């Protein structure tokens, strides 16, 4: 009997060991599953992807959104936003964004692609930053200058100035639009966005005050630019912008001659250009008036630092 019982006891002991081991493994598996779930939960707090039309808007989004946003710039630095065409890969990347921040006026690529963004991702929130702003028409030459291009000027041009961000006052309203968009997407973090917005609005107020102080003593309020990017800036600070470009076209020889006479009459000594456009015509005018060509970029990334730099350039040349 003892010999028969022993194998049974051995089997029972082995079975019990396997059972206990199985329970332990199941417990470890449960712990592992909990860790995986915790990892997934922590991963849900991913930053909101926000696509922006042009570089300056990226700072507005990042200043309000902080570490809760990730920005994607549609028009890369150095590209001309008036003519840039997106590649299929870029369209696909932008379509993943939860929010698209647009200039909302005068940017041809926005009109062409917004419908495509909405079709590809119907959940994307479109924020139009020109909403509520007093929009300006693009600067034109005087009647005498325009007469040489009358036939071309009568073509179908909307003529609204898209460079709305060059005015710090406009920038404040654009920041408000972005803030409202982020709160709509992420209401749980409203207090965070509100704090960031208020801090940045104070920075913009301080910027505006500095610019006014720099330009206050300038007697000559006229300046010449190749591309009319600074109309809103000029309107804010009582300046007169004279564009070299005519309706987006290179000026004719006749126009250049008239521009040279106008620059002399207005005591213009500097022609402002930006890297996205050829400086050739501006250089011709500058040479004839004994002036110089100076680069200022309305599309630079660090908005406040750039506007401080630009206003320094204006102050030095509007004496």
Image (cartoon, rainbow, N blue to C red):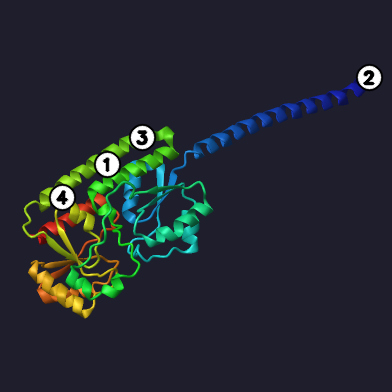
Considering the numbered disc 2 on the image, is that residue within a helix, a strand or a loop? loop
- The residue drawn where x is 44% and y is 43% is 47
Q: Where's the C terminus, which quadrant? A: bottom left
State the residue position of label 3: 192
**Image quadrant where residue 9 sits:** top right
Q: Mark 2 vs mark 4: which is more N-terminal?
A: 2
State the residue position of label 1: 200
Give residue 310's position: percent from left, percent from top: 19, 57
Q: Nearer the viewer, residue 157 or 287?
A: 157
Is the residue marked by circle 1 packed among few (<14), some (14-19), or many (20+) residues within 10 Å?
A: some
Q: Mark 1 vs mark 4: which is more N-terminal?
A: 1
Q: Which of 80 and 247 is in front in this view?
A: 247
Say if mark 1 contacts mark 2, CB within 8 Å: no
Q: Mark 4 against mark 3, which lies toward the viewer?
A: 4
Q: Mark 1 vs mark 2: which is more N-terminal?
A: 2
Give residue 306's position: percent from left, percent from top: 23, 54
The CA distance from mark 1 to mark 2 is: 90 Å
Is the residue marked by circle 4 packed among few (<14), some (14-19), or many (20+) residues within 10 Å?
A: many
State the residue position of label 2: 1
Give residue 25's position: percent from left, percent from top: 68, 32
- The correct choice, above or below, for 267 with respect to 92 in the image is below
Residue 211: numbered disc = 4
**Image quadrant where residue 282 sits:** bottom left
The CA distance from mark 1 to mark 4 is: 17 Å
- The residue drawn where x is 13% and y is 76% is 287
- The residue drawn where x is 60% and y is 31% is 31
Q: Mark 1 against mark 2, which lies toward the viewer?
A: 1
Q: Mark 3 vs mark 2: which is more N-terminal?
A: 2
Q: Which of 113 and 135 is in front in this view?
A: 135
């Amino acid at each position: 009997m003892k010999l028969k019982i022993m194998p049974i006891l051995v089997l029972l002991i082995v079975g019990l060991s396997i059972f206990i081991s199985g329970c332990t493994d199941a417990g470890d598996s449960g712990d592992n599953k909990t860790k995986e779930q915790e990892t997934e939960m922590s991963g849900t707090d991913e930053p909101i992807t926000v696509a922006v039309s042009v570089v300056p808007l990226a700072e507005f989004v990042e200043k309000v959104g902080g570490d809760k946003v990730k920005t994607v710039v549609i028009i890369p630095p150095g590209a001309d936003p008036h003519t840039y065409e997106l590649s299929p890969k870029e369209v696909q990347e932008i379509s993943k964004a939860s929010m698209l921040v647009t200039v909302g006026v005068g940017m041809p690529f926005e009109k062409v692609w917004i419908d495509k963004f909405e079709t590809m991702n119907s959940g994307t929130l479109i924020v139009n930053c020109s909403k509520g702003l007093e929009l300006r028409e693009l600067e034109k030459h005087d009647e005498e200058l325009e007469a040489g291009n009358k036939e071309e000027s009568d073509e179908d041009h909307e003529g609204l100035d898209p460079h709305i961000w060059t005015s710090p006052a406009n920038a404040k309203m654009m920041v408000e639009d972005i803030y409202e968009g982020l709160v709509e997407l992420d209401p749980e973090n409203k207090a965070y966005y509100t704090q960031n917005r208020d801090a940045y609005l104070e920075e913009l107020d301080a910027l505006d005050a500095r610019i006014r102080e720099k330009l206050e003593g300038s007697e000559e309020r006229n300046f010449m630019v190749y591309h009319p990017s600074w109309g809103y800036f000029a309107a804010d600070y009582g300046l007169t912008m004279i564009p070299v470009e005519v309706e987006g076209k290179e000026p004719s020889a006749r126009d250049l001659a008239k521009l040279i006479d106008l620059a002399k009459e207005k005591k213009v000594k500097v022609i402002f250009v930006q890297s996205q456009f050829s400086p050739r015509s501006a250089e011709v005018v500058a040479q004839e008036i004994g002036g110089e060509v100076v680069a200022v970029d309305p599309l630079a990334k660090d908005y406040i630092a750039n506007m401080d730099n630009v206003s320094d350039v204006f102050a030095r040349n509007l004496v």
